[in-house]
Image (spheres, helix red, strand yellow):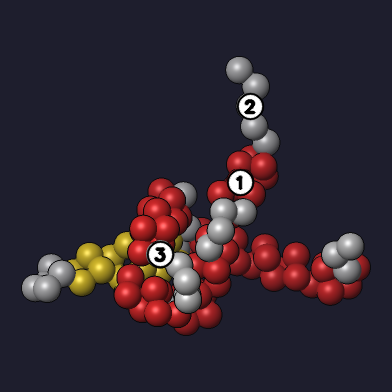
Amino acid sequence: MEKTCPITQILNYLSKKWTLLILRELHNNGTKRFNELIKEMENISPRTLSQRLKELERLELISKNRFNEIPPRVEYSLTDKGKELINCFKYLDIWVRKFGAE
Protein backbone atom coordinates (compact mmCIF):
# COMPACT_ATOMS: atom_id res chain seq x y z
CA MET A 1 0.00 0.00 0.00
CA GLU A 2 1.33 3.43 -0.95
CA LYS A 3 1.62 5.97 1.87
CA THR A 4 0.13 9.39 1.28
CA CYS A 5 2.34 12.40 1.86
CA PRO A 6 1.55 13.94 5.29
CA ILE A 7 1.22 17.39 3.72
CA THR A 8 -1.31 16.03 1.23
CA GLN A 9 -3.25 14.40 4.06
CA ILE A 10 -3.57 17.59 6.12
CA LEU A 11 -4.37 19.68 3.04
CA ASN A 12 -7.17 17.25 2.16
CA TYR A 13 -8.78 17.95 5.52
CA LEU A 14 -8.11 21.68 5.51
CA SER A 15 -9.41 22.14 1.96
CA LYS A 16 -12.90 21.01 2.95
CA LYS A 17 -15.36 23.88 2.88
CA TRP A 18 -15.59 25.76 6.21
CA THR A 19 -12.63 24.05 7.89
CA LEU A 20 -10.18 26.95 7.66
CA LEU A 21 -12.91 29.43 8.52
CA ILE A 22 -13.68 27.52 11.72
CA LEU A 23 -10.01 27.53 12.67
CA ARG A 24 -9.74 31.24 11.89
CA GLU A 25 -12.84 32.02 13.96
CA LEU A 26 -11.48 30.15 16.98
CA HIS A 27 -8.08 31.79 16.53
CA ASN A 28 -9.41 35.34 16.15
CA ASN A 29 -12.19 35.20 18.73
CA GLY A 30 -11.17 32.48 21.19
CA THR A 31 -13.38 29.84 22.73
CA LYS A 32 -16.83 29.52 21.15
CA ARG A 33 -19.98 27.53 21.68
CA PHE A 34 -21.68 25.71 18.80
CA ASN A 35 -24.45 28.30 18.35
CA GLU A 36 -21.95 31.15 18.48
CA LEU A 37 -20.05 29.54 15.60
CA ILE A 38 -23.30 29.11 13.64
CA LYS A 39 -24.08 32.83 14.07
CA GLU A 40 -20.58 33.98 13.15
CA MET A 41 -20.31 31.75 10.10
CA GLU A 42 -23.25 32.66 7.93
CA ASN A 43 -24.67 29.94 5.69
CA ILE A 44 -23.00 26.97 7.37
CA SER A 45 -25.50 24.26 8.23
CA PRO A 46 -25.54 22.78 11.74
CA ARG A 47 -24.82 19.35 10.24
CA THR A 48 -21.76 20.59 8.35
CA LEU A 49 -20.46 22.50 11.37
CA SER A 50 -20.88 19.41 13.53
CA GLN A 51 -18.98 17.27 10.99
CA ARG A 52 -16.12 19.75 10.67
CA LEU A 53 -15.81 20.15 14.44
CA LYS A 54 -15.61 16.38 14.87
CA GLU A 55 -12.91 16.15 12.18
CA LEU A 56 -10.89 18.97 13.74
CA GLU A 57 -11.23 17.40 17.17
CA ARG A 58 -10.10 14.02 15.81
CA LEU A 59 -7.05 15.75 14.28
CA GLU A 60 -6.45 17.33 17.71
CA LEU A 61 -6.55 20.83 16.21
CA ILE A 62 -9.44 21.85 18.47
CA SER A 63 -10.65 20.69 21.85
CA LYS A 64 -14.22 20.18 22.96
CA ASN A 65 -14.84 21.11 26.59
CA ARG A 66 -18.04 19.69 28.09
CA PHE A 67 -19.41 21.27 31.25
CA ASN A 68 -21.47 19.20 33.66
CA GLU A 69 -24.38 21.65 33.75
CA ILE A 70 -28.06 21.71 32.97
CA PRO A 71 -28.63 22.60 30.23
CA PRO A 72 -25.41 21.07 28.92
CA ARG A 73 -22.73 23.48 27.76
CA VAL A 74 -19.98 22.67 25.27
CA GLU A 75 -17.20 24.99 24.14
CA TYR A 76 -14.63 24.65 21.38
CA SER A 77 -11.14 26.11 21.33
CA LEU A 78 -7.85 25.71 19.50
CA THR A 79 -5.35 23.26 20.92
CA ASP A 80 -1.62 24.02 20.96
CA LYS A 81 -1.37 21.89 17.82
CA GLY A 82 -4.08 24.02 16.19
CA LYS A 83 -2.32 27.24 17.20
CA GLU A 84 0.91 26.00 15.64
CA LEU A 85 -0.97 25.24 12.42
CA ILE A 86 -2.34 28.80 12.39
CA ASN A 87 1.26 30.04 12.67
CA CYS A 88 2.11 28.04 9.53
CA PHE A 89 -0.61 29.91 7.68
CA LYS A 90 0.79 33.23 8.86
CA TYR A 91 4.05 32.35 7.09
CA LEU A 92 2.11 31.25 4.02
CA ASP A 93 0.30 34.60 4.06
CA ILE A 94 3.64 36.42 4.16
CA TRP A 95 4.89 34.33 1.24
CA VAL A 96 1.75 35.01 -0.83
CA ARG A 97 1.99 38.75 -0.16
CA LYS A 98 5.64 38.71 -1.21
CA PHE A 99 5.39 36.54 -4.32
CA GLY A 100 1.70 36.60 -5.22
CA ALA A 101 -0.58 33.66 -5.83
CA GLU A 102 -0.82 33.37 -9.58
Q: Earlier in the sequence, mark 3 or mark 1?
A: 1
Amino acid type, callout 2: Lys
Q: In which quarter of the image is the N terminus?
A: top right
Q: Which residue is under mark 3?
A: 45
Amino acid type, callout 1: Asn
Q: Nearer the viewer, residue 72 or 40?
A: 40
* C-alpha distance separating marks 1 and 2: 14 Å
* C-alpha distance separating marks 3 and 1: 21 Å
Q: Which residue is under mark 2?
A: 3
> Measuring 91% from the left and 68% from the top, which residue is drawn there?
99
> Measuring 47% from the left and 76% from the top, which residue is drawn there?
42
Q: Residue 12 has which mark? A: 1
Q: Earlier in the sequence, mark 1 or mark 2?
A: 2
Residue 83, horizontal then vertical, whole percent: 54, 66
Q: Is residue 70 left or right of residue 75?
A: left
- Mark 1 secondary-structure assignment: helix
Q: In this view, does 21 lie to the left or right of 58?
A: right
- Mark 2 secondary-structure assignment: loop
- Mark 3 secondary-structure assignment: loop
Judged by depth in the image, the label closer to the viewer, 3 or 1, is 3
